[in-house]
DNA sequence: ACGTTACACGTTACAAGATAACATTTCAGC
DNA sequence: GCTGAAATGTTATCTTGTAACGTGTAACGT
């Protein structure tokens, strides 16, 4: 269920949306009301959001929206780097930093379910080099680590 | 569809199965005919196998097997490290090296669909250390990189 | 103004992936 | 043989994702 809690302050939220607006303009794409609303929903989530939960959250008097609606919006947002898919959860998150490259790293807390976008420094480079020695040319890397976040460790 | 091609030689295949047998004995688990057959099917695949394709491949005169059958067998094999799940494909592969720890790295070829299990050297350690600086304690890491494998690069 | 094109969005239907819950079998150990 | 634990069978259902086609709409050239 999609609730009221916020992973970002109101200020951060409007910054991210403004950033998205800017990026779309720059790329000649348009952040339509629907896409913008989905982005806002993603930003408001405390953690990764399921497609069907977003769908329900979008729903109006005319009943809940239909699956293609949300999947198309998510595809658009991901294409621009404004959202990411977390494969191991079948869930989606807004990009933390406005928009970033296609290779992402997430630290997913087993306890609270939040996902932290992360910069791994040289880990990605090393992986690319190691793979290249093997003749493999990496185009995109997904890294998802699960464990305990700082907050949950303190609490325990 | 699950076909006849082999990603491993007959010798490698029986080595892997023997290894699995040994591991089960050691852990007091039993490699039942069903589990063994699923493992063999996985080993025979040229690439990652979908659950429902395995299911169809298992099917007998009594029609195709039912989903829980295959998911339970896969869960068992994964618990022992004999198989891995590739999250970005919703697919499964036999472990290349008999059985390995829960943190895996796969290089997935966009062209031929094969998935190569890979040792990233220090990448994992670095990631763990970087995350720790952030207070995050990693339990398990999933790395899936997509791109072009050596064979497909040569062909192109 | 008019048609054309391109794109976003709506709608229906379905495909694909996964699990819950309960029944049955099997087999080691008493 | 009886019993309990583990594995498997069975039914039903749930979740996740897409294909295919229809409709609105804004930009463009004529």
Image (cartoon, coloured by chain):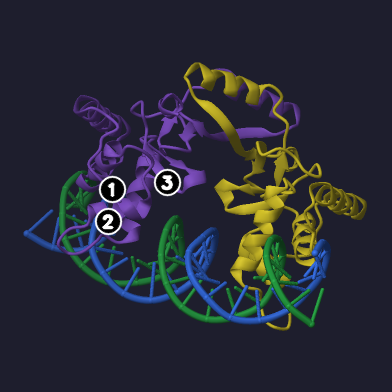
Chain colours: A purple, B yellow, C blue, D green
Would you identify the image quadrant in which residue B96 lies? Answer: top right
Left or right: B8 with respect to A127? right
Distance Cα–Cα, label 2 vs label 1 = 8 Å
Left or right: B9 with respect to B40? right
* Residue to which mark 2 is pinned: A56
SS of the residue at dot 3?
A: strand
Q: Are marks 1 and 3 in contact (CB under 8 Å)?
A: no
SS of the residue at dot 2?
A: helix
**Residue nearest the viewer, comparing A130 with B60:** B60
Q: x, y (%) of residue B114?
A: 70, 48
Q: x, y (%) of residue A143?
A: 55, 34
**Residue nearest the viewer, comparing A103 with B150:** A103
The chain identifier of the residue carrying mark 2 reads A
Distance Cα–Cα, label 2 vs label 3 = 14 Å
Would you identify the image quadrant in which residue A20 lies? Answer: top left
Please determine whether, in this image, residue C7 is positioned above or below residue C4: above
Checking the image for residue A91, the label placed there is 3
What residue do we see at 60% from left, 67% from top?
B68
Distance Cα–Cα, label 1 vs label 3 = 13 Å
- Upstream in sequence: badge 2 or badge 3: 2
Q: Residues within 10 Å of mark 2 (few under 14, many from 20)?
A: some
Observer able to see residue B59: no
- For the residues beneath circles 2 and 1, the answer to whether they share a chain is yes
Q: Are marks 2 and 1 in contact (CB under 8 Å)?
A: yes
* Residue to which mark 1 is pinned: A2
What residue do we see at 25% from left, 38% from top?
A5
């Amino acid at each position: 269920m999609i609730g009221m809690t916020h992973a970002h302050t109101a200020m951060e939220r409007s910054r991210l949306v403004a950033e998205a607006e800017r990026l779309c303009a720059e790329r000649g794409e348009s952040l339509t009301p629907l896409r913008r609303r989905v982005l806002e929903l993603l930003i408001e989530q405390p953690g990764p959001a399921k497609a069907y939960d977003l769908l329900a959250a979008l729903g109006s008097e005319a009943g809940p929206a239909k699956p293609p609606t949300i999947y198309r919006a998510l595809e658009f947002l991901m294409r621009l780097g404004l959202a990411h898919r977390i494969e191991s959860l079948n869930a989606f998150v807004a990009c933390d930093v406005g928009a970033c490259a296609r290779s992402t790293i997430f630290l997913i807390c087993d306890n609270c379910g939040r996902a932290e976008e992360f910069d791994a420094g040289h880990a990605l480079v090393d992986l690319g080099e190691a793979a290249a020695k093997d003749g493999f040319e990496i185009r995109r890397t997904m890294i998802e680590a699960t464990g305990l976040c700082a907050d949950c460790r303190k609490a325990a």
